[in-house]
Image (cartoon, rainbow, N blue to C red):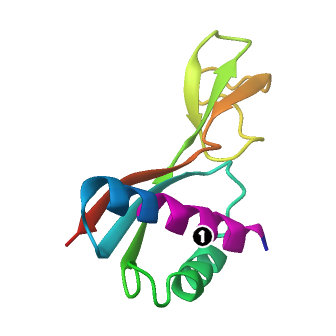
Amino acid sequence: MHEMALCESLLQAMEEAGRANGFSRVTRVRLEIGRFAGVEVEALRFGFDVVTRGSLADGAELVVLDVPGRGWCFDCSDTVDLDDRLSPCPHCGGSRLHPNGGTEMTIKDLEVE
């Protein structure tokens, strides 16, 4: 389950931010996760609860913000939002799309004490 590894990296980033910015507790984490990132959100939530026990983020609320996929259409030369990798272009109906966004997972912000 790669979500556990993602949670460990997330915790490490929060600990580094805590040292750099002088906070000792995280109460809320907002993550932006692209639809094409391949992250199972429920597994991520479970892993977050397990990995953060006893840490500066123990008991923190995890808020997941869904980021649409993006693709460039070869037929109409437009960049469009996509629900999944196989969706047709919402502008022209074309099927020749090159995904170019929606694979990221980013810490949007932290609420800290």
Q: Is residue 98 magenta?
A: no
Closest to the observer, 95 or 45: 45
Provide the secondary structure element on which disc 1 rests: helix
Q: Is residue 45 left or right of residue 94?
A: left
Residue at 64% across, 9% down: 77
Estimate the x, y position of residue 55 in percent, counting from the top left: 44, 82
Residue span colored magenta: 2-14
Residue at 60% across, 62% down: 9
Estimate the x, y position of residue 89 in percent, counting from the top left: 66, 28
Check disc 1 and give the amino acid type.
Answer: Cys
Q: Is residue 13 left or right of residue 40?
A: left
Q: Is residue 47 above or below residue 34?
A: below
Q: Is residue 18 left or right of residue 15?
A: left
Closest to the observer, 46 or 36: 46
Which quadrant holds the N terminus? bottom right
* Residue placed under numbered mark 1 in the picture: 7
Closest to the observer, 105 or 10: 10
Which quadrant holds the C terminus? bottom left
Q: Is residue 97 left or right of residue 89?
A: right
Estimate the x, y position of residue 69 in percent, counting from the top left: 60, 41
> Would you identify the image quadrant in which residue 17 lies?
bottom left
Residue at 75% across, 24% down: 98
> Would you identify the image quadrant in which residue 75 lies?
top right
